[in-house]
Amino acid sequence: MTSAPPQHPTDARAAFFAARPTRSATVDLSVRIGSLTLANPVMPASGCFGPALGRLIPVAELGAVVTKTVFGTPRGGNAAHRLTEIRAGMVNSVGIPSRGAAGFLAELHPRYRELGVPVIISVGGHRPAEYAPVVRDLDGAGDAYELNVSCPNLDRLGTDIGSDPDAILAVVRAARQATDKPLIVKLPVLASSIADCALAAQEAGADAVCVANSIPALPLQPDTRSPALGNVIGGLSGPSIRPIVLRLVWLAARAVEIPVIACGGIETAEDALDYFAVGARAVQVGTASFGRPFAMVEIVRALQERCADDEVAGIRDLIDLWRAQ
Amino acid sequence: MTAMASLAREALRRQQAFAAADEAALDGLISVRPPAGQPRPEPVWDDARVLEHTNVGQRYRRLVLATGTIARTALAGQFLMITVPPTGGERILLPRPMAIHRRHPDAGTVEVIYGVAGRGTIALADVAVGGSLLVTGPLGRGFEIPSDARTALLIGRGVGVCAIMASVEDAAARGVDATVVLSGRTRFDLIGVTDCAELGAAVIPVTDDDGSSSIPALGERLRAEFRDNPPAVILVCGAGVLARLAAELGAEWGVPVQVSLEAHMACGLGYCHGCAAPVATDPEVEGPLVCVDGPVFDAALPVSSL
């Protein structure tokens, strides 16, 4: 739902909707993910976006949106408390509640379609064989699919699918058979070699990798030192993980030809430019949207301004400019 | 162990036992309210100027925020997400959900009262008058006084009073006789005494230091007060044990009870799925969320305990 801004802005949201960028004509921020061209490289991280945000920000200014992970069958999610904030960042153990593929198509997909930008559907599974059937069930619905392989592998207990190059090969090869649409593989932080995992995704036919996901963490309550989360373990996100993920993006971008989408603690255009400088071609924004719902749109506008100020056509030229100095 | 350490440990143990009992008191009590009679207002975000920021008693702070759209549209019991600006080197990432205590549509302002309790609210307490705060709202499903109600009982404890005060405004505007229980540790900690006086609501102040806030004492007092003429609805916020008492009174009097809950939240709009409500559901089906299905829920005793 992209709501029309009021004629006379009465609050900061309305003023933000009304402030359309004016200097973007000469700047081209577009990026290709396989056969899909995004108007710009900024999109939400899976789980940190919903159609409800379309009431607060001009979503049509984003490059794409990414859905919460869809599993084949419904899941209830974890027990409360599902999230907490510690000095190091936000830790969540939401547990990916999902209405399943059928529920997503019936209830959520139409609302995503109203947003006016490409829709990337995040797909999950409890074992490698579960991904392709979900992609097949969803086909036609997504403009691209992001395979969330940061899930515990029930076929090999104690490992995540995405930390095991063989499991990644199996997931992506099967999904490749299930759709012609672009496939993005969202890799976890705790892989023994992010380069090997990214290479496995590329070899199996993925069109991009997304690096990375939240970092497994155990937050305690300050007074009692008992676990702060119902699930005990959660995923750490926010600005503190940025230098960790920056290294992983650098490693992955050196290893593969396909685009690397960076995801980890991005709050501003400056943060996004750090990732572009180490080889990322697009960025996902997660935790920052909670405190500042307009963060993603602000990043798009700031990237346009930045390129226009430096009189360059796009982000690649901006980076070349820095390198030349 | 020194006597001081022993006392501190005992206080912590009591606090934990109380928290556990309070959470358990909600078991089986909560259900999602039927669809609202009126549509929810469109939420906005705004840079709200801080017009006042003052102490309330020993432990609370009161903000008066200039945010015209929210002041004009917020329904009773709705809440704001307040983004805490960086202060003193402290970065707070997640906005804090806070009830809209008072709406002043003509002035274009809302009031919020919060307890200074953790990192977020300690940082928020430093925000200066004249600065601005990023606020998102109005959010969530609020309280509704049934259209045929002529009387209402509202029960608030601590900062939970803030969730019910806009319903006291509604009651005053509609000529509903409101009786408001204000509960707190001491009479200096009570929130809402002057608000209720301004709005013409009868107040029953109860406190821990004289024992009047204990559940048996309060239950006895309310049963005596309303024996011949029960209120048409009960609205409650601030403690699980108070919600259970309200549900017991509701069952005895045959009147509906609505309770406002709190939860850790990240988005406030439903998309992060962070605020699971304490409702037992099928493990394959996601239960309700406090932010969009609540924060106001129906509270009724489980059939087995009637």
Image: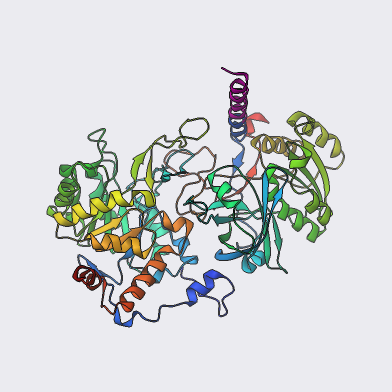
Quadrant in which the C terminus of chain B appears: top right
Q: Nearer the viewer, residue A28 or B202?
A: A28
Q: Is residue B106 above or below residue A125?
A: below
Residue at the (82%, 51%) spot, across then down: B201
Residue at the (34%, 49%) spot, across then down: A241
Q: Is residue B52 above or below residue A20?
A: above
Residue A107 in view of the camera? no
Residue B22: x and y in percent read: 62, 33
Residue B209 appears left or right of A142 = right
Predominant secondary structure, magenta span: helix
Q: Nearer the viewer, residue A133 or B168?
A: B168
- Extreme residue in the right direction: B228
Q: Which residues are magenta?
A: B1-18
Q: Is residue B48 above or below residue A85?
A: below
Q: Nearer the viewer, residue B258 or B121?
A: B121
Residue B35: x and y in percent read: 60, 55
Q: In the image, is residue B12 part of the stretch drawn in magenta? A: yes
Residue B65 sits in quarter: bottom right
- Extreme residue in the front direction: A325
Residue B52 in view of the camera? yes
Residue A292: x and y in percent read: 47, 60
- Extreme residue in the left direction: A203
- Extreme residue in the top direction: B1
